Amino acid sequence: MKILLIGANGQVGNDLRELLPALGEVVSAAVEGNQDLVIDLKSRDSIVNAVRDVKPDLVVNAAAYTAVDKAEDEPDLARQINAEAVWVLANACKIGGAALVHYSTDYVFDGKANTPYRENASTNPANVYGETKLAGEAAIRDSGVPHLTLRTSWVYSTHGHNFLLTMLRLAQEKDELDIVDDQHGTPTWANTIARATVHALSTFAEGDSPVQALEKTGGTYNVTAEGYTTWFGFATFLLGYATQLRLVQHLPELSPVTSEDFPTKASRPAWSVLDNTRFCEQFGWTPPAWQTAVRHCLDQLVERLA
Protein backbone atom coordinates (compact mmCIF):
# COMPACT_ATOMS: atom_id res chain seq x y z
CA MET A 1 0.00 0.00 0.00
CA LYS A 2 1.29 3.43 -0.95
CA ILE A 3 0.19 6.22 1.41
CA LEU A 4 0.29 9.98 0.93
CA LEU A 5 0.32 11.68 4.34
CA ILE A 6 -0.65 15.36 4.24
CA GLY A 7 0.12 17.50 7.27
CA ALA A 8 3.07 15.39 8.38
CA ASN A 9 4.44 18.17 10.60
CA GLY A 10 1.25 18.64 12.61
CA GLN A 11 0.31 17.15 15.96
CA VAL A 12 -1.41 14.03 14.61
CA GLY A 13 0.68 13.97 11.44
CA ASN A 14 3.92 13.79 13.39
CA ASP A 15 2.81 10.53 15.04
CA LEU A 16 1.31 9.18 11.84
CA ARG A 17 4.66 9.70 10.15
CA GLU A 18 6.19 7.30 12.67
CA LEU A 19 3.38 4.71 12.64
CA LEU A 20 2.07 4.52 9.07
CA PRO A 21 5.21 2.85 7.60
CA ALA A 22 4.03 -0.36 9.29
CA LEU A 23 1.30 -0.45 6.63
CA GLY A 24 3.29 0.43 3.53
CA GLU A 25 5.32 3.06 1.70
CA VAL A 26 4.65 6.56 3.03
CA VAL A 27 5.19 9.82 1.18
CA SER A 28 5.11 12.61 3.77
CA ALA A 29 3.78 15.98 2.68
CA ALA A 30 3.64 19.21 4.68
CA VAL A 31 2.03 22.56 4.07
CA GLU A 32 5.43 24.04 4.88
CA GLY A 33 8.76 22.76 6.14
CA ASN A 34 11.08 19.91 5.23
CA GLN A 35 9.24 16.79 4.07
CA ASP A 36 9.21 14.66 0.94
CA LEU A 37 6.67 17.03 -0.57
CA VAL A 38 5.18 20.46 0.17
CA ILE A 39 1.52 21.02 -0.70
CA ASP A 40 -0.12 24.43 -0.84
CA LEU A 41 -3.68 23.83 0.39
CA LYS A 42 -4.73 27.17 -1.09
CA SER A 43 -3.81 25.92 -4.56
CA ARG A 44 -6.04 23.48 -6.41
CA ASP A 45 -3.20 22.58 -8.78
CA SER A 46 -0.82 21.83 -5.92
CA ILE A 47 -3.29 19.38 -4.37
CA VAL A 48 -4.29 17.71 -7.63
CA ASN A 49 -0.71 17.41 -8.85
CA ALA A 50 0.43 15.83 -5.59
CA VAL A 51 -2.20 13.09 -5.78
CA ARG A 52 -1.58 12.56 -9.48
CA ASP A 53 2.21 12.38 -9.12
CA VAL A 54 2.38 10.20 -5.98
CA LYS A 55 -0.37 7.84 -7.19
CA PRO A 56 -1.29 6.71 -3.66
CA ASP A 57 -3.66 3.91 -2.71
CA LEU A 58 -4.57 5.91 0.39
CA VAL A 59 -4.38 9.58 1.33
CA VAL A 60 -4.33 10.51 5.02
CA ASN A 61 -5.14 14.19 5.49
CA ALA A 62 -3.95 15.44 8.87
CA ALA A 63 -3.71 19.08 7.76
CA ALA A 64 -6.23 21.73 8.76
CA TYR A 65 -6.77 25.32 9.80
CA THR A 66 -7.11 24.89 13.57
CA ALA A 67 -6.78 28.43 15.01
CA VAL A 68 -10.30 28.51 16.47
CA ASP A 69 -10.37 32.15 17.57
CA LYS A 70 -8.40 33.44 14.58
CA ALA A 71 -10.91 31.77 12.26
CA GLU A 72 -13.50 34.32 13.37
CA ASP A 73 -11.33 36.99 11.72
CA GLU A 74 -10.23 34.80 8.80
CA PRO A 75 -13.37 32.88 7.81
CA ASP A 76 -12.47 32.80 4.12
CA LEU A 77 -9.03 31.32 4.79
CA ALA A 78 -10.44 28.79 7.26
CA ARG A 79 -13.06 27.71 4.71
CA GLN A 80 -10.49 27.57 1.93
CA ILE A 81 -8.33 25.10 3.87
CA ASN A 82 -10.94 23.15 5.85
CA ALA A 83 -13.61 22.85 3.18
CA GLU A 84 -12.57 23.92 -0.32
CA ALA A 85 -9.18 22.20 -0.24
CA VAL A 86 -10.82 19.08 1.19
CA TRP A 87 -13.31 19.07 -1.69
CA VAL A 88 -10.45 19.26 -4.20
CA LEU A 89 -8.53 16.53 -2.37
CA ALA A 90 -11.53 14.20 -2.11
CA ASN A 91 -12.26 14.51 -5.83
CA ALA A 92 -8.60 14.05 -6.74
CA CYS A 93 -8.63 10.83 -4.68
CA LYS A 94 -11.85 9.69 -6.35
CA ILE A 95 -10.42 10.27 -9.82
CA GLY A 96 -7.08 8.71 -8.90
CA GLY A 97 -8.58 5.60 -7.33
CA ALA A 98 -7.39 6.36 -3.80
CA ALA A 99 -9.26 6.16 -0.50
CA LEU A 100 -9.17 9.04 2.00
CA VAL A 101 -8.72 9.32 5.76
CA HIS A 102 -9.63 12.73 7.19
CA TYR A 103 -9.91 14.26 10.67
CA SER A 104 -12.74 16.40 11.99
CA THR A 105 -13.78 17.85 15.31
CA ASP A 106 -16.21 17.84 18.23
CA TYR A 107 -16.87 21.49 17.36
CA VAL A 108 -19.35 20.42 14.66
CA PHE A 109 -21.80 20.20 17.60
CA ASP A 110 -23.29 23.13 19.51
CA GLY A 111 -22.59 21.73 22.97
CA LYS A 112 -26.20 21.81 24.21
CA ALA A 113 -26.41 18.06 24.86
CA ASN A 114 -25.73 16.33 28.17
CA THR A 115 -24.84 12.85 26.93
CA PRO A 116 -21.96 11.87 24.61
CA TYR A 117 -22.60 12.68 20.96
CA ARG A 118 -23.00 9.77 18.56
CA GLU A 119 -22.01 10.18 14.93
CA ASN A 120 -25.62 10.66 13.74
CA ALA A 121 -26.45 13.41 16.26
CA SER A 122 -27.63 16.70 14.79
CA THR A 123 -24.78 19.09 14.02
CA ASN A 124 -24.92 22.81 14.68
CA PRO A 125 -21.48 24.44 14.94
CA ALA A 126 -21.13 27.37 17.31
CA ASN A 127 -18.12 28.96 15.58
CA VAL A 128 -16.50 29.46 12.18
CA TYR A 129 -13.94 26.72 12.76
CA GLY A 130 -16.68 24.17 13.42
CA GLU A 131 -18.66 25.37 10.41
CA THR A 132 -15.71 24.95 8.06
CA LYS A 133 -14.82 21.51 9.42
CA LEU A 134 -18.43 20.39 8.98
CA ALA A 135 -18.36 21.68 5.41
CA GLY A 136 -15.23 19.60 4.85
CA GLU A 137 -17.04 16.49 6.09
CA ALA A 138 -19.88 17.19 3.66
CA ALA A 139 -17.46 17.74 0.78
CA ILE A 140 -15.96 14.30 1.34
CA ARG A 141 -19.34 12.59 1.47
CA ASP A 142 -20.58 14.43 -1.61
CA SER A 143 -17.48 13.46 -3.60
CA GLY A 144 -18.31 9.78 -3.27
CA VAL A 145 -14.72 8.87 -2.38
CA PRO A 146 -14.37 5.84 -0.06
CA HIS A 147 -13.35 7.48 3.18
CA LEU A 148 -12.84 7.36 6.91
CA THR A 149 -13.66 10.65 8.65
CA LEU A 150 -12.56 10.60 12.28
CA ARG A 151 -13.96 13.22 14.66
CA THR A 152 -11.85 13.87 17.71
CA SER A 153 -11.51 16.46 20.47
CA TRP A 154 -9.17 18.53 22.66
CA VAL A 155 -6.03 17.32 20.88
CA TYR A 156 -2.65 17.75 22.56
CA SER A 157 0.89 16.47 22.04
CA THR A 158 4.51 17.19 22.96
CA HIS A 159 4.91 19.71 20.15
CA GLY A 160 2.95 22.42 18.38
CA HIS A 161 0.38 24.69 20.02
CA ASN A 162 -2.01 23.01 22.45
CA PHE A 163 -3.50 23.27 25.94
CA LEU A 164 -1.05 20.87 27.58
CA LEU A 165 2.05 22.76 26.46
CA THR A 166 0.40 26.10 27.26
CA MET A 167 -0.32 24.96 30.82
CA LEU A 168 3.26 23.73 31.29
CA ARG A 169 4.56 27.11 30.13
CA LEU A 170 2.18 29.15 32.26
CA ALA A 171 2.96 27.02 35.31
CA GLN A 172 6.57 28.17 35.03
CA GLU A 173 5.55 31.82 34.72
CA LYS A 174 2.66 32.29 37.15
CA ASP A 175 1.74 31.40 40.73
CA GLU A 176 -2.01 31.50 40.06
CA LEU A 177 -4.03 30.33 37.06
CA ASP A 178 -7.74 30.73 36.27
CA ILE A 179 -9.04 27.76 34.23
CA VAL A 180 -12.47 27.35 32.63
CA ASP A 181 -14.52 24.71 34.44
CA ASP A 182 -17.86 24.73 32.59
CA GLN A 183 -16.77 23.26 29.25
CA HIS A 184 -16.73 19.45 29.10
CA GLY A 185 -14.76 17.31 26.66
CA THR A 186 -12.19 14.56 26.31
CA PRO A 187 -8.47 15.42 26.21
CA THR A 188 -7.08 13.25 23.41
CA TRP A 189 -3.39 12.65 22.80
CA ALA A 190 -2.38 12.94 19.15
CA ASN A 191 -0.58 9.61 19.52
CA THR A 192 -3.88 7.98 20.51
CA ILE A 193 -5.53 9.27 17.34
CA ALA A 194 -2.65 8.10 15.17
CA ARG A 195 -2.64 4.65 16.77
CA ALA A 196 -6.41 4.33 16.37
CA THR A 197 -6.05 5.27 12.69
CA VAL A 198 -3.35 2.70 12.01
CA HIS A 199 -5.29 0.08 13.97
CA ALA A 200 -8.40 0.65 11.84
CA LEU A 201 -6.39 0.47 8.61
CA SER A 202 -4.71 -2.73 9.76
CA THR A 203 -8.10 -4.47 10.00
CA PHE A 204 -8.59 -4.48 6.23
CA ALA A 205 -9.41 -7.94 4.95
CA GLU A 206 -6.56 -9.70 3.19
CA GLY A 207 -6.53 -8.75 -0.47
CA ASP A 208 -8.73 -5.68 -0.04
CA SER A 209 -7.39 -2.37 -1.31
CA PRO A 210 -8.09 0.72 0.81
CA VAL A 211 -10.86 1.65 -1.61
CA GLN A 212 -12.48 -1.78 -1.32
CA ALA A 213 -12.12 -1.83 2.47
CA LEU A 214 -13.54 1.64 3.06
CA GLU A 215 -16.41 1.01 0.68
CA LYS A 216 -17.41 -1.61 3.28
CA THR A 217 -16.46 -0.02 6.61
CA GLY A 218 -15.88 3.65 5.83
CA GLY A 219 -17.87 6.66 6.96
CA THR A 220 -17.77 9.00 9.94
CA TYR A 221 -16.57 7.79 13.35
CA ASN A 222 -15.71 9.34 16.71
CA VAL A 223 -12.19 8.70 18.05
CA THR A 224 -11.16 10.09 21.42
CA ALA A 225 -9.72 8.85 24.67
CA GLU A 226 -12.13 7.37 27.23
CA GLY A 227 -13.92 9.52 29.79
CA TYR A 228 -14.28 13.27 29.99
CA THR A 229 -13.45 16.26 32.15
CA THR A 230 -13.32 20.06 32.04
CA TRP A 231 -10.39 22.29 31.13
CA PHE A 232 -9.93 22.83 34.87
CA GLY A 233 -9.91 19.08 35.49
CA PHE A 234 -7.48 18.57 32.62
CA ALA A 235 -5.13 21.25 33.94
CA THR A 236 -5.31 19.98 37.51
CA PHE A 237 -4.40 16.43 36.47
CA LEU A 238 -1.64 17.27 34.00
CA LEU A 239 0.07 19.83 36.21
CA GLY A 240 -0.12 17.51 39.21
CA TYR A 241 1.66 14.78 37.27
CA ALA A 242 4.05 17.27 35.65
CA THR A 243 5.07 18.39 39.13
CA GLN A 244 5.84 14.80 40.09
CA LEU A 245 8.01 14.49 36.97
CA ARG A 246 9.66 17.86 37.75
CA LEU A 247 8.56 19.28 34.43
CA VAL A 248 7.37 22.22 36.52
CA GLN A 249 9.01 23.32 39.74
CA HIS A 250 5.84 23.99 41.71
CA LEU A 251 2.10 23.60 41.29
CA PRO A 252 0.39 26.98 40.78
CA GLU A 253 -2.82 27.72 42.58
CA LEU A 254 -5.59 26.78 40.14
CA SER A 255 -8.98 28.48 40.31
CA PRO A 256 -12.07 27.28 38.39
CA VAL A 257 -13.85 30.00 36.43
CA THR A 258 -16.75 30.15 33.98
CA SER A 259 -16.63 30.77 30.26
CA GLU A 260 -18.09 34.22 30.95
CA ASP A 261 -15.10 34.97 33.16
CA PHE A 262 -12.74 33.98 30.34
CA PRO A 263 -14.26 35.33 27.09
CA THR A 264 -12.86 34.25 23.73
CA LYS A 265 -13.59 35.50 20.25
CA ALA A 266 -15.02 32.13 19.17
CA SER A 267 -17.82 30.53 21.15
CA ARG A 268 -16.90 27.14 22.64
CA PRO A 269 -19.44 24.34 23.19
CA ALA A 270 -20.18 23.66 26.85
CA TRP A 271 -20.45 19.93 26.11
CA SER A 272 -18.42 18.24 23.37
CA VAL A 273 -18.01 14.69 24.64
CA LEU A 274 -18.03 12.13 21.81
CA ASP A 275 -19.26 8.53 21.96
CA ASN A 276 -16.58 6.11 20.65
CA THR A 277 -18.80 3.00 20.60
CA ARG A 278 -19.21 2.71 16.83
CA PHE A 279 -15.49 2.90 16.11
CA CYS A 280 -14.58 0.53 18.94
CA GLU A 281 -17.08 -2.10 17.81
CA GLN A 282 -16.32 -1.80 14.11
CA PHE A 283 -12.55 -2.00 14.43
CA GLY A 284 -12.05 -3.81 17.75
CA TRP A 285 -10.30 -0.87 19.41
CA THR A 286 -10.06 -0.05 23.11
CA PRO A 287 -9.37 3.62 23.86
CA PRO A 288 -7.11 4.55 26.77
CA ALA A 289 -8.47 6.57 29.68
CA TRP A 290 -7.66 10.21 29.08
CA GLN A 291 -5.64 10.31 32.31
CA THR A 292 -3.49 7.36 31.19
CA ALA A 293 -2.76 9.03 27.86
CA VAL A 294 -1.79 12.31 29.57
CA ARG A 295 0.69 10.45 31.77
CA HIS A 296 2.21 8.67 28.76
CA CYS A 297 2.48 11.97 26.88
CA LEU A 298 4.28 13.66 29.76
CA ASP A 299 6.55 10.62 30.22
CA GLN A 300 7.45 10.96 26.54
CA LEU A 301 8.17 14.65 26.99
CA VAL A 302 10.54 13.88 29.88
CA GLU A 303 12.38 11.38 27.68
CA ARG A 304 12.63 13.91 24.86
CA LEU A 305 14.05 16.57 27.17
CA ALA A 306 16.54 14.21 28.84
Image (tube, rainbow, N blue to C red):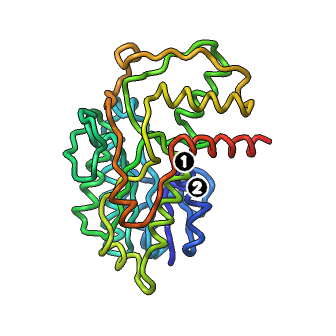
- Measuring from the top left, give residue 221's x and y in whole percent: 34, 57
Residue 195, placed above or below residue 25:
above
Relative image position of residue 64 (x, y in whole percent): 42, 48
Question: Quadrant of residue 92 in the image?
Answer: bottom left
Residue at 62%, 41% in the rendered image? 295
Residue 31 at least partly seen: no
Specify the amino acid type for callout 2: Asp
Quadrant assignment, res 28: bottom right
The x and y percentages for residue 100 are 38, 66
Left or right, 238 with reference to 99: right
Tell me if residue 264 comes above or below residue 141 in the rendering. above
User: Which numbered disc covers residue 11?
Assistant: 1
Q: Which residue is mark 2?
A: 15
Residue at (74% x, 30% y) in the render: 246
Asked whether residue 232 appears in the rendered view, the answer is: yes
Q: CA distance from mark 2 to mark 1?
A: 7 Å
Identified at 39% across, 51% down, the residue is 42
Q: Amino acid at mark 1?
A: Gln
Residue drawn at x 33%, y 64% is 90
The residue positioned farthest toward the right in the image shown: 306
Image quarter of residue 260: top left
Q: Secondary structure at mark 2?
A: helix
